[in-house]
Amino acid sequence: MTRKSHLYQFHKENAKITEFSGFDMPLWYKGIIEEHMAVRNAAGLFDVSHMGRIWISGKQATDFLSYVLPTNSHLIKDNRAFYSTICDQDGGIVDDVITNKFSNEKCIMIVNAGNREKDFRWLNSHCSKFEVELNDFSDNSALLAFQGPLASGILQQMTDLELSTVRRFAFKEGRVDGEECLISRTGYTGEDGFEITIFNTPLDSPEKALKVWNELLRRGANYGVLPCGLGARDSLRLEAGMCLYGQDIDDATTPVEAALEYVINEDEREFIGKEKLVAQLKSGTDRKRIAFSMAEAGIPRHGFNLTFSEKPVGTVTSGSFSPILKKGIGMGYVKSPLTTLGERISVDIRGSEKSAVVVRTPFYDTSNYGFKRKNVPSS
């Protein structure tokens, strides 16, 4: 039996529903491309309440995090969020997570929907050596993502917090439309925006979540703000070059292979997977994640072969049509000698070899799109 999020009733009445990670979730409302472009040009509102939320608290909370993550969380300032990966002893990625660090003694970890129970068990299995407590409060809170260049201006109308003081990957506690929330300047689209945790919101009493959701849509209606489903979420994160767990990364992939070396702090402390990850940092890996843009007509899809001189050299892990570039883009793993920017490879699209070029991410021009854009429209 599939699970339902706090906002399921809204989705049921307004969206095309699909099963994702055991949840009934909106695939799209008006359409994937229309919702994608709303986020790039105005703002879009996503229900991400299916993601897991775990309180990590206690005297040694930061020591614990610095052991289960390759990132040394002691280096992270209070009231900052950071991206990292939970790794196993062989360096394989158990999950990729965002952690909001309130202090050395209190953090919230956001985990992928399909890994909620697995991650909680994994973390619990490694906490006995630390003075730390774990509490999965996912079903007693809701999580919304409000993303796009107009998100800040519209959200500012609903909170007394001065959002201009909340830097990227920082957060503050405050009220949104009168409800107690955590407002984090993070997201999964490449755009500026916020992820809003609404506290004390049980699944069987979702009124707070619905109130904030509907008010954001009401205030944004005149600016082109749309509710967005998983389809646009996937195309947006791919344009931004962000990984999807279970496709681009998994427990058979290390952060080094996935081109996520920046999550690893190589220092004196012990952390799970250290021996393998440090060895890979020094010696390299046989394969590496790349991004590529199609040089010919054709849409790459998950599972398609990547080739060089007509020989298989890897596999597409994520691929789709880019509404911004108006052509096919993708990511995948290839043998390390083929990772150079500008390298020509091919994608086997249903038996036809189509040329592609290795490129950097994000795929779009960052002066026109994304959180670094030069011209931000006013709301």
Image (spheres, rainbow, N blue to C red):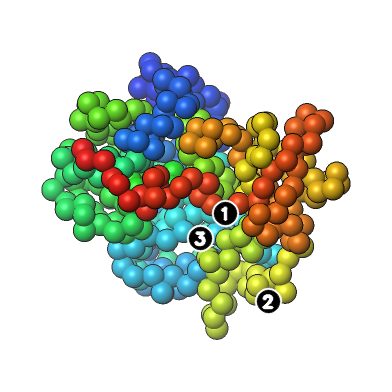
The residue at which mark 2 appears reads as 282
Give the residue at x 52% y 37%.
325
Toward which corner of the image does residue 336 lie, by quadrant?
bottom right
Q: Secondary structure at mark 1?
A: loop
Q: Amino acid at mark 2?
A: Lys
Residue 128 lies, in percent from the top left, at: 52, 68
User: Would residue 214 be seen by someone viewing this image from the given angle?
Assistant: no
- Camera-side residue of 373 and 304: 373
Per the model, the C-alpha gap separating discs 2 and 1 is 23 Å
Which image quadrant is residue 42 in? top left
Q: Secondary structure at mark 3?
A: strand
Q: Earlier in the sequence, mark 2 or mark 1?
A: 2
For the residues labelled 1 and 3, the Cα–Cα distance comes to: 20 Å
Residue wearing tag 1? 360
Q: Nearer the viewer, mark 1 or mark 3?
A: 1
| 337 with respect to 183 (left or right) | right
On the image, numbered disc 3 is attached to which residue? 84
Mark found first going from the N terminus, 1 or 3: 3
Residue 217 locus on image (x, y percent): 26, 28
